[in-house]
Image: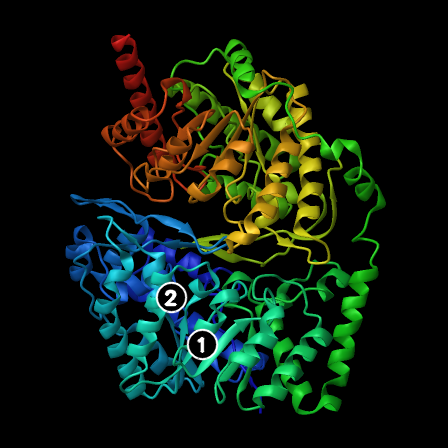
Amino acid sequence: MTTVTTLGFPRIGAKRELKAALESYWRGDTTAADLQATARDLRHRHWQLQRDAGADVVPCNDFALYDHVLDTAFLFDAIPEAYRTLADSDPLAGYFALARGVQRDGTDLRALEMTKWFDTNYHYLVPELHADQDFRLRGDKPVAEFLEARAAGHAARPVLLGPVSFLLLAKTVDGSDRLALLDRLLPVYADLLSKLHDTGADWVQIDEPCLVLDLDDAARDAYVRAYAALAKGTRPLLLLATYFGRLGDNLPLACALPVDGLHVDLVRGKEQLDEVLRQLPKGRVLSAGLVDGRNIWRTNLDNALILAKYAQGHVGDRALWLSPSCSLLHVPVDLAGEKALPVDLKSWLAFARQKIEELRLLADALQDPRAADAGLALARDRIESRRQSRRVHRPEVAARLASPEAGDIDRDSPYPQRRIAQATLLGLPAYPTTTIGSFPQTHEVRGARARNKGGKLSDADYETFLREETERCVRFQEEIGIDVLVHGEFERNDMVEYFGEQLDGFAFTKNGWVQSYGSRCVKPPVIYGDVSRPAPMTVRWSQYAQSLTDRPMKGMLTGPVTVLQWSFVRDDQTRAQTCRQIALALRDEVLDLEAAGIRVIQIDEPALREGLPLRRADWQAYLDWAVECFRISAAGVADDTQVHTHMCYSEFNDIIDAVAAMDADVISIETSRSRMELLEAFVKFRYPNEIGPGVYDIHSPRIPTGGEMLDLLEKARAVLAPEQIWVNPDCGLKTRGWPEVRTALERMVQAAHALRRDTAQAA
């Protein structure tokens, strides 16, 4: 009988229960025991949900209070020395200090660097290692959660991040070779596998997602050495899990490793199935990732069944597992709670539970085709309904995409000329200060929005509230001396959702939450059809804010690539085509902002690097259309209108040519957690335009000192021309509280003023 299983499940809960529990614990309102009780309840609820949906085996140890990579580092005692005393005395406090930083009772620790998990919008904490790193088991989380699942009556498979991927995803603080630590790490993995075997685990899933990347000889050798070592001794059977793409030239390596099963992504890499079946040694289990674990569209089960039958014919029932393409971490929990979606649109969607039900139907069809006929017919009808729907395809959008306007991607003049025009118009001082856009979304702001949506606060009263909040924000920025202001975005719920709600072609769920990092959850819009802008989206609030001040006010937009990346995107046309539709809609907004007197416009693209394909051979095609889409959105404004963009938590070295080709007048980037490391790419490239290297890490509650900010700016000034440098936080401030924001921004402005005085004295 074919086995149905999953590689991982969403942690946060259908109603973000984990978020609420974490933030309550961090505020001190609840205890560690309360937090762990919520976590335990979520694990049990999710195991049972998977079983009820049709899974034969459920994953365990895929749950994390904050991040699974951080869990791995903590489990193997890869804890930087500065955190060790706290981690030893209070493990939970040490864990969260690594994730968020801590600043209390004489303890002042920054958070670990955070970056994107491959090409997803999930962020992981980057482990910090050094040449003399030792590893040991700290606690027994994988064993304990396996025992917990088994005691609850579930057939469970522990999940571990593999040793080679763990090292490749980490960084060394002393410049040493990460993979040189492999021989120290492997005995600890072997010890853990032995403990899991002794506890009764039949299988362990070892995730090695780096096998879908371009690997050098050293990394390939590391895989060979690692799994030769782990194959020895007493251990459970090992499922090697790869995902997020095809194995490509790493397929022979993956098939040759001495493991007992191999998971492959047959959504992003369905073309690899034939070669996998040829190279997979006889007797190995094949876990076939047939259902998309990263998007919410129903699977074309007829096509998936063809692949499943082909695989079954080669490996047999008992050696075939049916799975999602990757962990279901990246999709919402259950579609059942979505009562407000149009009936036809809802029928096209599948969340985590529905994806497992699809896998169950496929497995049943392999076992007894007649018993699955009704389910397959219903699935077929849903696919056809979507294909023919008039709400999906709009001729006027296709016509605009084919017009000459869609090919207009150039500003009137090159940057040096634009810079002169902008300096004349804006009259900014040296080292101008600004923020990235949003200000704190306080309990009062969120409450007013909820009351307005629920009919308990009139539109007129809500409008008055937003105007007062906006004016308060503007006055605060004037008071502390910010040079280019923002309106605070109090009317906005999310930087993508807010725009999607005003664009045609988007739909929204009520509980479609996914985890971005820690307790930060997002509810991605669903792009189901052709995109256009019926009316201006941001002009009214930007214009109102500008009327309150003589200082320049930034118009704030989310860029086309980021809107695309942070949505669930239609899969019936290319992502490039959808992105161009979004770009043209945003172009209309940019031109309307300019016409309304807004002469500084920020078009955020934090997801540009995130969307980069995992294989270098695929990069250029993506970068070509991604850069083109940004330029479509910005083209058409006058030379003296200053266009900003923003990117965060990205490695820029590989894409710096494309970043420069975007031709934004100013780019702000995250550099505080990396201590200006991310600035190096711009320096080596001799980036010609202006740069705002973020000096305040807004993803941590820790408030940096003025001296720290000044030190970061001095590092920037040592490698950039003074006229290039802007001073700003590394991201928007919506998740922070007003007291910390006030203090941090006051210190930031003071640091900028210190640089101005120093520059004036030197002159």
- Quadrant location of residue 411? top right
Q: Secondary structure at mark 1?
A: strand
Bin the neighbour count of mark 2 within 10 Å (Cα to Cα): few under 14, some 14-19, many 20 and up.
some
Question: Residue 572 location, x and y as percent?
Answer: 73, 58
Q: Which residue is mark 2?
A: 220
Query: Can residue 496 be seen at all in this image of the molecule?
Result: no
Q: State the SS at label 2.
A: helix
Q: Nearer the viewer, mark 1 or mark 2?
A: 2
Q: Is residue 302 left or right of residue 139?
A: right
Amino acid type at image mark 2: Arg
From the viewer's perspective, tell me whether residue 270 is left or right of residue 36.
right
Image quadrant in which the N terminus is located: bottom right
Q: Tell me residue 473's x, y (percent).
A: 47, 27
Q: Residue furthest front?
A: 217
Query: Of the residues shown, which amino acid type is indicated by label 1?
Result: Pro
**Cβ–Cβ below 8 Å for labels 1 and 2?**
no
Please name the residue shown 43% across and 25% down the image.
434
Is 601 left, or right, of 80 in this rendering?
right
* Disc marking residue 59: 1
Of 518 and 588, which appears nearest the observer? 588
Residue 30 versus residue 539: which sits nearer the camera? Answer: 539
Can see residue 389? Answer: yes
Please tell me which residue is depicted at 41% across the width and 22% down the height of the picture.
724
Q: What's the distance in space between the residues labelled 1 and 2, CA to CA?
A: 27 Å
Q: At 72% from the left edge and 64% from the top edge, which residue is drawn?
A: 348
- Mark before the other along the chain sequence, 1 or 2: 1
The image shows residue 162, relative to residue 283, as above or below, that is above
Give above or below for 405 relative to 271: above
Seen from the viewer's position, the closer of residues 748 and 470 is 748
The structure residue drawn at horizontal position 61% and vertical position 61%, both measured from the top left corner, is: 295
